[in-house]
Amino acid sequence: MVGMVGVCQFTPILLFTLFAGALVDRFPKRNILLMTQSALMIQAIVLALLAYFDMLQYWHILLLSIFLGLTQTFDMPARQSFFIELVGREDIMNAVSLNSTIVNLAKIIGPALSGIVMVNFGTVYCFSINAISFFAVLLSLFYIEVSPQQVIRKKQKVMQEVKEGLSYIRQRKALMINIMFMAIICTFAMNNAVIIPVFAKSVLGLGAAAYTGLMSAAGIGALIGAVFMAFRAEKGVEKAFFIFCLCATAFLQVLMVFVADYNVAFLCIACIGFLNLAFMNMGNSIFQLNSDSEYRGRVMSVYSFLNQGSTPVGNFYAGTAMEYLGGIWGFPLCGIAAVGLLSIVFICERHEIFNWIHDNEKRADEKISI
């Protein structure tokens, strides 16, 4: 039942995010965010009211999850492509890093606070606080000042714009290399939510405390990674470090087959969290820096597609592997799949990747117009 909630939330992103990116390119990003965040607030209010009046049923949650997924389909590419309008090209990596810091800090603090509220006051209060929090979000968006943007309103059909965006991406070496790497890592190396609870129980022989501890380890590693990337943002995207992170996270997950101690697992999962965050941070920046403003919404919709839309595929793979082979094989088989696919990419595209890493030109192909 919990799995179906995830399917309902992420399937709209899988199916519609590319079309959403085409629409995002037509309108000012802040206006889109005001609409999507208002819709998310309405969803949160409905959930809180249903819980308050003791009317909440399973099918309500499924419908609200679908609504949440549809809204996020538009919210994510608009939000990601809004960063560069706020800070400019030179500071985009710092902005992405700071955003990652906030997000991962919230992932650590939020569940801890919600647990306290839930135990002492009940879930209704959690839902209510969540709904009220959107007023601060909307107020912040209302007062944000951005430079006037030239919005290109196209009359062609959305499908044609999607094809045009995909064609634009195919013509840019940096974007295509980034997409191949992100597709592999996001699908096979980011399945902690499915693997960790089974690993804690079947491999370590521990209960909920170990599960929450290992999930916290992933969050702590990601938070350290976000702060680390924020401090080194002035260096820009170091492509060699980018390659190191994606290879290291894949190999580290393969080595998890030898881990049967909680403390070692905590350290390894924290390292995986760090590497995944650093990789995603640089991957996001590559997308931002290598796309023109006319296409940025569509480019970032591909980022959203890879980041969130691949979740059902990766979760199904990891879950099936552990179902038939045991919890010990969750991390290793995901790592083996990632290593195998990365090897194919490196062999088939070795010249392109080598030239991309050692490209010392002044990014003539990375100019952006804002």
Image: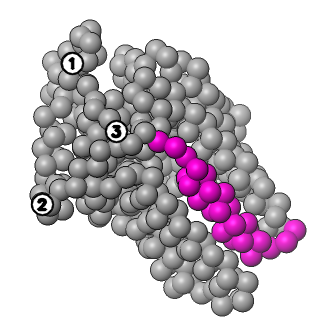
Residue 142 image position (x, y, % from top left): 56, 55
Viewer-nearest residue: 289 or 52: 289
Residue 135 inside the magenta-drawn segment: yes
Q: Is residue 6 above or below residue 357?
A: below
Residue 43 image position (x, y, % from top left): 55, 74
Lower position in the chain sequence, tag 3 or tag 1: 3
Magenta segment main secondary structure = helix
Residue 129 inside the magenta-drawn segment: yes
Q: Amino acid at mark 2?
A: Gln
Q: Quadrant of the C terminus?
A: top left
**Mark 1 neighbour class, 10 Å CA radius: few under 14, some 14 to 19, many 20 or more:** few
198 relative position to 49: left or right = left
Residue to which mark 1 is pinned: 364
Residue range highlighted in magenta: 120-146
Viewer-nearest residue: 169 or 145: 145
Residue at 51% over, 85% down: 59
Residue 267 image position (x, y, % from top left): 65, 31
Residue at 28% over, 49% down: 151
Q: Is residue 45 above or below residue 111?
A: below
**Quadrant of res 103:** top right
189 relative position to 94: left or right = left
Q: Amino acid at mark 3?
A: Met
**Mark 3 neighbour class, 10 Å CA radius: few under 14, some 14 to 19, many 20 or more:** many
Q: Is residue 264 visible?
A: yes
Viewer-nearest residue: 89 or 54: 89
Residue at 75% over, 60% down: 114
Q: In front of the other: label 1 or label 2? A: 2
Task: For marks 3 and 1, give the CA distance.
Answer: 24 Å
Which SS class for mark 1?
helix
Residue to which mark 3 is pinned: 182
**Quadrant of res 81:** top left
Residue to which mark 2 is pinned: 156
